[in-house]
Amino acid sequence: MEIHPLFAGMNSSTSGMTAQRKRMNAIAENIANIETTRTEEGGPYRRKATSLTEDKSFEIALSNSTNQTLARADKNHMFGRDESKTLASMSGVKATVEQDPSAFREVYDPDHPDADENGIVRLPNVDLVQEMTDLISASRAFEANVTAFNATKAMMKKALEL
């Protein structure tokens, strides 16, 4: 997959939006299963946690994308690939959804159909306050990526007017 450097900012924002969407989907699943005591695997639902990491394949695609170099006309311009100083490499982000290994919540409810012989029911390890906080954070990060994407698009459009 070759990415022209002109679109690198848009692709970086797109990878961020994709990761945040995946994070919001995991949060929605956690909230939907907050009271699920029986799953296909047996036992209560286990919370899904999302970890965000740097996407190395994105960096490789950017570095192999072109042989073109830009001339540096002003000392304040960024260094190009052919000069001695190197630029910080751009990369995308990738979301990985994993099961949270924390302990299940235990509640005393002897009338519950899934209660053990002591009347204890094991409930999912999902905390609604934490999930809502994470959802707001993911939503704001998604909005920030949309704003960056639109700013890049506006700059490209303005450059075409010159």
Image: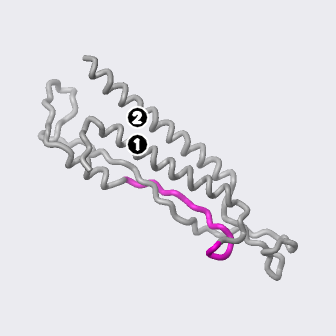
Q: Tell which of 6 and 88 is nearer to you.
A: 6
Q: Which mark is residue 14?
A: 1
Quadrant including the C terminus: top left
Task: Residue at 50% x, 41% y: name it.
Answer: 141
Counting labels gives 2
Residue 111 location, quadrant: bottom right
Q: Is residue 158 above or below residue 10?
A: above
Q: Which residues are magenta?
A: 40-54
Whether 46 is among the magenta residues is yes
Task: Residue at 50% x, 47% y: name it.
Answer: 20
- According to the picture, the residue beneath numbered tag 2 turns out to be 149
Q: Do residues under tags 1 and 2 come within 8 Å of each other at their CB atoms?
A: yes
Q: CA distance from mark 1 to mark 2?
A: 7 Å
Q: Amino acid at mark 1?
A: Thr
Q: Amino acid at mark 2?
A: Phe
For residue 142, side relative to residue 122 (left or right) = left
Image coords of residue 135 (percent x, y): 60, 47
Local packing at callout 2 (Cα closer than 10 Å; few below 14, some 14-19, many 20+) is many
Task: Residue at 40% x, 34% y: name it.
Answer: 149
Image coords of residue 47 (percent x, y): 61, 63
Residue 74 location, quadrant: top left
Task: Residue at 62% x, 75% y: name it.
Answer: 41
Q: Is residue 116 above or below residue 96?
A: below
Element type at marker 2? Answer: helix
Element type at marker 1? Answer: helix
Q: Is residue 100 above or below residue 90?
A: below
